[in-house]
Structure formats: structure tokens, C-alpha cells
Amino acid sequence: MSAVRRGTWSLLAAALLIPLLTHPARADELPDTSTGGSGGGDSQEVAAQVQNSTIKISQIKGGGGGKKGNLAPIDVDWEPPACWYEPVYTPEQLKKAVEDDSISAVGLHEFWPQSSFQEHYDEGKPRDNFDLYEEEDSTAEGYKNYNIGKGGYFWRGVAPDDSHPDSWNCGRLMFWMPDNQVPQIPNAPTPQMLAEYAYEHVKVPDTEVEVRPQARSTVNLPTWVWLDKGKFEDVVVRAELPRTNLYAETTAHPVSLTLEPGTEDAETFPADGTCRINDDGSIGSPYKKGSADQDPPCGITYLRASDEPYQLSASITWEISWEGTGGAGGDLPDGTFETTQDMTVQEIQSINR
């Protein structure tokens, strides 16, 4: 497809087809690929969450109990993949779905009646294939009797949010691949793609910190901030794509706590407000009686009393790395998780020691 034809098609798609075709594939269209059957099971549960993805997610280390949250990438321009391709049907499963008229999505943004599925996947008739990466008009060759007897899987585009503009990059018609083979095409799944997908599923502990004086500070006297050891440890999330031998494990490693006092009338310790996390998972040092007028290794001195409580913000920075199939690996953008808590500052020049 020429650049002009691609641009024309994209404009037409945006203007005409999106209102008609961008509803998500029904979760009940998916077979249970974990068992080879055609019923519900785990893949149904995943599909209900992420449309029609069969990626399996498990948190295999860290996180602990209590309140948790998702990481926010520090790089605001970074985002996980908008779309990719996955194996979704065996030939036998596809044939049954067509015969039962329980399938409509032949692509991420294209939906067919039963007769069109029969013509293409049973009778072998070719169809125009929407593929932004082809330089010429693309044709999808048809299949005879759904490729039954050849094994393998039919693959289809997947998008967590099919209204995302880049989801149109996975517009190929559903196509067949042999067992445990991954297509060599743009937006095919890779270990890095799975690592980026897993990033979205990393759950880290709440960052509420211990302060002394507790929830109440005094003008010009330091407020100590700390967390006991073991509060923060590595969190590891594994993402696997069935029938592909692809996996990735994404690791979030806590490195620092950043304090934002909630007012410009304050000083932080250290001066940049960033406290390193110790090897044992602790932050700073606990307040001890008699230390009120000392500079804490991690803390804040408020310089003005508050009519209303200041909003003390505490955010943990997590370094993100991954490793996966075939020894692949690398880094992803750091992430943060932030909480706020009230800090009342009073106008008293001394406190009990």
C-alpha cells in the first residue's frame, strides 16, 4: 500500500470506521487456550480484564500485605505497547466458532458475518488485508477447511484499549502460524513487549512514612521521617504468552524516597529531599528521645505554622529492569508511587525531650 493510500485509508478509518468497528472483541469469543477446550477458564477471566488478551500475569516476589498501587513512569512520554498479536484459536476451535456463529472479530478493528469467515477460512477465498506496514496493497490468502490437520494457531490483534490511535497498527486479518512459532512481523510479541506489559501490573506497597512528632510538627524544629527495614523490597512480575514459549520477568527495585513538604516554607534533609533506601529496605533513622534539635538523615523542618495541614508528599522511586526468553533483558523507565498525609505545624519554639 503506498504512503498516499495508507494516509487516505487512515483518514477514512478515523472518520468513518471507528464509530462502527472499534468495539472490543467479546470476551466469550475466546477459547480456553490453556486447556485446548472451547469453554471458559482462566483465559476468559483475563479477557474480561484486558479485552481479548491471554497473557498470564503473576507477581512472584515482593509486594507484601497491606495497601498497594500501580507505578507511574517517571518518563511521561513512555507508555506500554498499544497493541500486539496473539494466538487465539486452533483450526478446530475456529471452525467450531464459525459454525456456532460465535465469532465476529476477524481483526482488531474488523468484524465479519459468518459467511465471510466461511469464504476465507474454509473455502480459501483471499481478502484485502489492512496492514499499515505493507508498501503495496496487501492481500490475505485464504485457507482450506480452516487448516485442520496442520496444527498451529490462528493469530489476531490485541489492544488493551482499542480506541488508542496506535491500535490500528495491528490491523491484519486473523492469520495462521505453526505451533510455537512467532510471526516475524511488526507488533509481534517479544520478551520486551511482555516486560512492558508486566510493568502495568507491578503492585508496590503504599509509601506512607513514619514521622515524629507524629502528624504534628513544630516551626523550626526538624520532623524526622523514616521507614523500618523490610518495608520495601524488590517486586517481580512475570508475564507469559501461552503457545509461544515467550515470557518476561519485570523487577521493580526501590532506590529512594522523595519528600515534598507541601509548602515552600520548609527545608528538607537531605537538601534535595531525596533519601536513599538502605540495603535492608529501611529509610532514614528512627527518631530517638533527645534528638529533636538534631538534623535527621531524612526529614523536614517547617519554617511557618499552618492554618490548614500541609500535604506532605512521600514518593518511592523504583528502578525497573527485566529479563526474559533466550536471555533477553534490559531496563525500563523508573517508576514512582506517591502518597500524601496531613502535617499540622504549630507555632511553639520548644518541645518535650
Image (cartoon, helix red, strand yellow):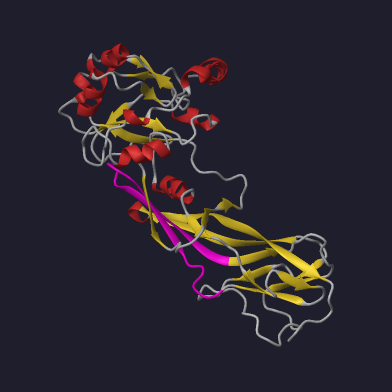
- Say whether residue 340 is left or right of residue 191: right
User: Which residue is at the front of the view, 108 or 349?
Assistant: 349
Where is residue 289? Give x, y as percent.
Answer: 68, 86
Using the rendered image of the protein, determine whether residue 128 is visible from the camera's viewpoint: yes
Q: Which residues are magenta?
A: 228-255
Residue beneath the point at 17% across and 30% down = 150
Where is residue 152? Give x, y as percent.
Answer: 23, 34
Magenta stretch holds residue 133: no
Looking at the image, how many numbered discs can be counted on the residues? 0
Residue beneath the point at 52% across and 29% down = 163
Residue beneath the point at 32% across and 28% down = 29
Where is residue 169? Give x, y as percent.
Answer: 48, 30
Q: Is residue 291 above or below residue 211?
A: below
Specify the quadrant that holds the C terminus. bottom right
Q: Is residue 196 above or below residue 317?
A: above
Q: Is residue 132 above or below residue 230?
A: above
User: Which residue is at the front of the view, 31 or 4?
Assistant: 31
Dividing the picture into quadrants, the one containing residue 307 is bottom right
Decide whether the magenta segment is chiefly helix, strand or loop: strand
Where is residue 257? Give x, y as percent.
Answer: 62, 66
Using the rendered image of the protein, determine whether residue 270 is visible from the camera's viewpoint: no
Magenta stretch holds residue 235: yes
Q: Is residue 153 above or below residue 339?
A: above
- Say whether residue 106 is left or right of residue 213: left
Dividing the picture into quadrants, the one containing residue 343 is bottom right
